[in-house]
Image (cartoon, helix red, strand yellow):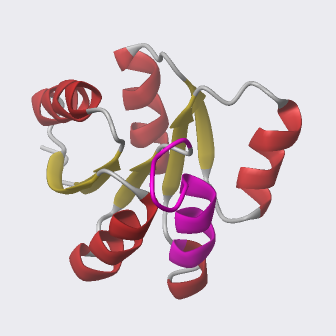
Amino acid sequence: MKNKAVLISDDSRSICALTAMVLAEDGYQVICEASDGEQAVHECLKCQPDFTLLDVVVPVADGRYALKNIAHYNPKAKIIIPSSLDSKNDVEECLRNGASSHIQKPFEEDVLLRVLDKMA
């Protein structure tokens, strides 16, 4: 069993629930969720997950804000950006600012699990 802790940050409850179910079936444990960028930073610092799944397009403070702050406080954080960003510049900006990987939304379950397993 993997038993790795994950934070999911997405403003869609259905995406959070589906992602949490997929992760749990593969041995990951979702320890906290966030629906906006400010909450993602707070939860990440409080929960100290092994992995953070961070959507960029969220309300209040976007995922870019959260990414920069999480990476600032924990430069070794493993942050995956599952996002509908399709611009090469957007993806490269996220990678420069601390993201470990990017997954294009909508994503296949096996793609997410392969990325997590590779980083574990």
Q: Is residue 38 above or below residue 8?
A: below
Decide whether residue 63 is among the magenta residues: yes
In this view of the protein, which residue sits in the foreground, 115 or 83?
83
Q: Position of residue 23 (x, y in %)?
A: 21, 34
Q: Residue at x 42, y 28 (%)?
A: 112
Q: Is residue 13 something one can see in this rendering? A: yes
| Callout count | 0
In this view of the protein, which residue sits in the foreground, 2 or 38?
38
Residue sitting farthest toward the right = 89
Q: Position of residue 114 (x, y in %)?
A: 44, 28
Q: Position of residue 64 (x, y in %)?
A: 63, 58
Q: Is residue 56 above or below residue 111?
A: below
Q: Is residue 89 above or below residue 33?
A: above
Q: Is residue 76 something one can see in this rendering? A: no
Residue sitting farthest toward the front = 60
Residue sitting farthest toward the bottom = 73
Q: Residue at x 39, y 39 (%)?
A: 117
Q: Residue at x 37, y 56 (%)?
A: 51
Q: Residue at x 31, y 50 (%)?
A: 35
Q: Position of residue 105 (x, y in %)?
A: 52, 21
Q: Which residues are magenta?
A: 57-70
Q: In which image quadrant can residue 83 be found?
A: top right
Q: In which image quadrant can residue 56 be found?
A: top right
Question: Which quadrant would the N terminus be assigned to in this image?
Answer: top left
Is residue 87 shown left or right of residue 109?
A: right
In this view of the protein, which residue sits in the foreground, 86 or 57?
57
Decide whether residue 21 is among the magenta residues: no
